[in-house]
Every structure is written in C-alpha cells, then in structure tokens.
Amino acid sequence: MPVVEEIISKSADETFDAGRALGKNARPGDVFALSGELGSGKTVIAKGIACGMGITDDITSPTFTLLEVYEGNLPLYHFDLYRINDLHELDNLFFEEYWEGDGVSVIEWAERAKIRLPAHATHITLEYLDETTRRILIERSDT
C-alpha cells in the first residue's frame, strides 16, 4: 500500500524546501515523477531536490532538450516530458536506463510517460489551491 504525505505550501520557498527535503534523502535509482498544471511548481520542486542533493547549478526546465544532467554527490537526470506526444519518443532517450544506474531521476510531466515509470517511483502531484498556495501530494511505494 502506498504511503501518501500531503504538504500545503504557501510560497515558492516552501515548495522548494519540500523538494530539498526529498533531495537530502535521495539514493541512487530514485525516481521522482512530478505532475501538475503548467506553473504549479514542478520545476521549483526539481530545484529543491537538486539543492538537497548538493547540486549548486542553476536548474531550469529542459523543455526543448528533454533531459539535462547535473553532477553532484549523485548525478541528477532532469527530464521534462512536456513536448512528448508519443511514448516511443522516449526510446531515443533510453529513458528507463537512467533509473537503473547511479543517479536520481526527476521527471516533469511524468503523466506523459504513463506505464513506463518504474513501480518504485515517488509520485509528486502539485495542485493549485489559490494564487500562492499549492497542495503537494507525495506518494511513495511502501517497498
């Protein structure tokens, strides 16, 4: 049974801090699957995860490149699937191989990967509550 945590974030800083907490505990092979409307805070969470992993680079959403790799204590593989229209487009990225290695994957617009996400992925859904407030649902596998 999955473990679900709910965080109510009242600012981008609080959303970043939620990501940083996840990043501090990240281990090789972890996959963070981020979903939410445009502008809901997916990239802010990704920046927080990177910070928690000790990465000091400026993290941006890799919308046009689909993948950016950042080096820190562990490599961070930052995917943005916004422009993916067909699951076969992921074949050229060797998508699944990234979470079989020594790094951590953060996947924005993860719902576009559908069944190709691993069972052990941590699913993070960001929902607008109002202009500055977000509900962050973190669903982890209990295995």
Image: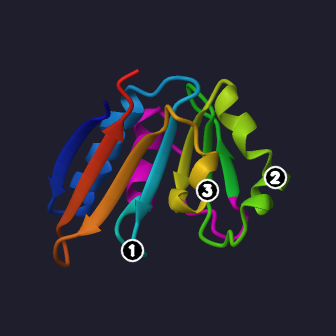
At label 2, the amino acid type is Asp
At label 3, the amino acid type is Ala
* Of residues 21 and 40, the one drawn nearer to the viewer in this rendering: 40
For the residue labelled by badge 3, is the local secondary structure a helix, a strand or a loop?
loop
Query: Residue pushed farthest front?
Result: 1
Q: Which residues are magenta?
A: 43-66
**Residue 39: numbered disc:** 1
According to the picture, the residue beneath numbered tag 2 turns out to be 91
Q: Callout 3: few (<14), some (14-19), or many (20+) C-alpha neighbours within 10 Å?
A: many
Q: Position of residue 113 (x, y in %)?
A: 61, 56
Q: Residue 79's quadrant in the figure?
A: bottom right
Q: Position of residue 71 (x, y in %)?
A: 64, 36
Q: Position of residue 19 (x, y in %)?
A: 35, 45
Q: Residue 126's quadrant in the figure?
A: bottom left
Q: As drawn, is 97 to the left or to the right of 71?
A: right
Mark 2 or mark 1: name the one nearer the start of the chain.
Answer: 1
Q: Position of residue 136 (x, y in %)?
A: 26, 54
Whether residues under marks 3 and 1 lie with C-beta atoms below 8 angstroms apart, the answer is: no
Q: Is residue 92 magenta?
A: no
Query: Gap in Å between the C-alphas at discs 2 and 1?
Result: 27 Å
